[in-house]
Image (cartoon, grey):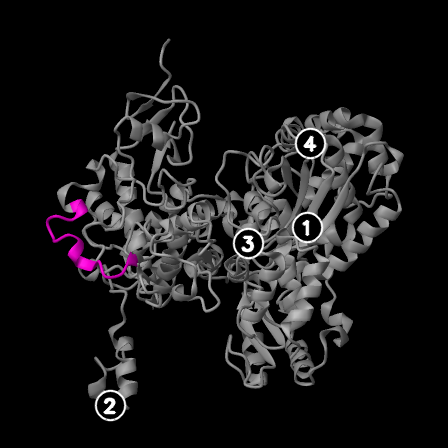
Amino acid sequence: MPTADPIVSAIVEKYRKNPTYVLQILREAQEALDWISPDTVEAVASGLNIPRTRVQSVVQFYSFLYDKPRGRYRLLFADNITDRMAGNIALFEHMLNRLKIKRGVVSSDGLVSVDLASDTGMCDQGPALLANNRAIPRLTMRRVDEICDLVKARAPLDEWPADLFRVDDNIRRRETLLTPITSGVALDAAIARGRQGMLDEVKRANVRGRGGAGFPMGRKWEGARNAPGAERYIVCNADEGEPGTFKDRVLLNSFSVRVLEGMAIAGYATGATKGFIYLRGEYKHLQAKLQREIDEMRADARLGASIRGCPGFDFDIEIYMGAGAYICGEGTAMVNSLEGKLGRPRVRPPSMVQVGYLGKPTVVDNVESLAHATEIAIEGGARFAKRGTRFSTGTKLLSISGDCERPGVYEYQFGVTIARVLEDCGAKAVSAVQIGGASGVLLTPDEFSRRIAFEDVPTAGAFMVFGVDRDIFEVARNFAHFFAHESCGFCTPCRVGTTIQRNIMDKIAEGRGARYEVNELKRVVEFMKRFSHCGLGETAGNAVRDALNKFRPAFERRLHAKDFAPAIDLERALEPARRITARDDAEAHLETES
Amino acid sequence: MAETTFNIDELPIPFTPGQTILEAAKAAGIYIPHLCYQPEFKAHGGCKMCTVMVNGKPQTACTHKAAAEQEVEVDTPELNASRRTLVQMMFIEGNHFCPGCEKSGACQLQALAYEYEMLTPHFVELFPERNIDASHPDVLIDYNRCVLCELCVRASRDVDHKEVFAIAGRGQDARLIVNSPSGKLGDSALAVTDRAAQVCPVGAIIVKRVGFAAAPIGERMYDKNPISAEADSCEIPEAQ
């Protein structure tokens, strides 16, 4: 194994010893060294001249950084509910058997480890896994065997068949956004409108943020432009961590002209000269491609100084990779992460447009929102606002997965009914749809006439379909596990509440819950909603709440007959004593197994 | 000139611009519970004990600025029940055995539990596996009792300028870590006289060889008065 020092110093030098890049440095160090050893921590800390605890904090905050060896090959199966429905667990167990290892335990030769992870943004082509942070979708038994063979042969990842890593767009329906534009056209149109004119058009378009919260983008831009100070930043939120969402992946892959020029337009209208793409760690496969496009844009005067020959229009873009933390999709947490800190949400106010990245006015916009800026630049706000509904203008991308014939990305004008979407994607005998991801809402057939719009069913785009044979309790339990895993730990209600929620769901799943647990779930969900620091905790109980309200029988049939059963399973608690005394006779058990 | 005021439980309270609700309330002698807040450090806002209703919306009083005409609810049955829930949550996520803890009687978590009538932990205890670090000659850390208030983190960074402490990990894995090659307190730059060694509101960071002798039962800090009656309840007494 190579030693940490020279490799780490080279990486630290590459980032000009700038501590805001600690996450990038650690990602690259891990790629070279397989894990972040204490020596690596020391080398990074001394190279950046920061306390080692700051480095350790970052390592331990992000799921894809490892402070213990996890093997040369680190395989993580996506475990969103849609992966479950597609049979990921059978594949996962097959791989464990083939490699003769246990979950999460490195093989004795230090070669490989296999574990489960949160959703990876491949729900339309799951089950998926990450091999050393590189996505491999469309898993089958045959593919798993192929991967096992490659691992056993110690083949470097770069030599694995390219087809393994092929990620499809699966665009099923297009309107205006999913239409290619010639590079430079949107920038020229924006320049022709002037900075104020461009801002006015965005306001006229009445476009609302596509990341879920729906804040009017024009007001955000104006706020940043009017905030005092010379430096401003644009952050493109490409963290897309919401389970069931993958539309940004498609925009970044095939419509990056819109995204990148949209960022430059945001810079033009707000006076920002620097932009970051905070790219989800799971989308590493897009990094090199996006970087090439950024380089081409610089060569082409579409980035850099005096863009398109317009004096004073200076803007540049840098890619910043995430490392597996759902919370970083929250705007203030993302900016903290960009600064090299833990991705924990900040206290608001002040808002990001006043005090954002490095204390400077910052606009954090979703990938899709920024892509819309190119439409507005070209056609103007009034025409843009003609699409969709009065309060939700323009089109919306939906990421459709689950029980349907044609999963993929669909573009609709706002206002489309859920029934229409289900018909288009070929979903039959549907019992429920989860809209907006794990933090969204669960809708049942009596609600399928409702519309996708901020004023009715708002969504960042996740649309997971569940057929009549699906067990909605297990859907809610999957999401409960997700939130307990992703809570950042900053505030008490979410840090503890998500764990309590998960444990109660597990107790009910084991058939040991009673009516008490059902009522307790309701209380905990309500408590998290009211007292949590940020949207994660506020929405962490949504799925459980909706499942309880709409699929009560799925809970009822699991409940223990009594009013209450203790949390401790006495029979199971005796197991260590039986093991120690090497006994397994009837007397060593509480009662005969029922 | 008319004084600017806002209302706490319908009582007009004066404030100066820039003051938080908690600061204004404290100046007016009104108790708002808090755990991770100390006046000498930048507000953190994580424990959520100081949550109050501001014009009907929950806000942390330690970070939210007072403003004219604001209607703030502090002492309501609903909020007090929620504070009890918060204390219960903090109890069950750590290992808090008051009878054996030398901070007992001077512990803010325990005092808050009394204040909000916590008679049981209510939730199923998580019983996490945590360690004790006795490597430092003068200061001991019992991680079982840490409530992640980050007071020691802030004190070490902002007052002692040593950055001895930090929080690492996420969710239930979030925990206090120590800045030393071994991760042990004994190898760190901490001195017993540091502010960081004094600010722990619970029994997680305690000074050695003081123990139960500091004050017998009946004469401990919160034996005399409940936490809500302590005029200076947000100030931690100097170590004995």
* Nearer-N-terminus badge (1/2): 1
Q: Amino acid at mark 3?
A: Tyr
* Nearer-N-terminus badge (1/4): 4
Foreground of the two, B10 or A561: B10
Residue A401, compared with residue A568, is above or below; it is: above
Comparing labels 1 and 4, the label whose residue is closer to the camera? 4
Query: Considering the numbered disc 3 on the image, is that residue within a helix, a strand or a loop?
Result: helix
Instruction: Residue B218: say if magenta.
Output: yes
Instruction: Residue B226: say if magenta.
Output: no
Q: Position of residue A568 (x, y in %)?
A: 27, 68
The quarter in which the N terminus of chain A is drawn is: bottom right
Name the residue carrying label 3.
A326
Query: Considering the numbered disc 4 on the image, is that residue within a helix, a strand or a loop?
Result: loop
Foreground of the two, A292 or A135: A292
Q: Residue at x 63, y 65 (%)?
A: A126
Q: Quadrant of residue B98?
A: bottom left
Q: CA distance from mark 3 to mark 1?
A: 15 Å
* Nearer-N-terminus badge (3/1): 1
| The furthest residue to the left | B218
Name the residue carrying label 2.
A585
Q: Quadrant of residue A243?
A: bottom right
Query: Considering the numbered disc 2 on the image, is that residue within a helix, a strand or a loop?
Result: loop
Comparing labels 3 and 1, the label whose residue is closer to the camera? 3
Name the residue carrying label 1.
A248
Magenta span: B206-222
Name the residue carrying label 4.
A230
Comparing labels 3 and 4, the label whose residue is closer to the camera? 4
Foreground of the two, B161 or B6: B161
Q: Amino acid at mark 4?
A: Ala
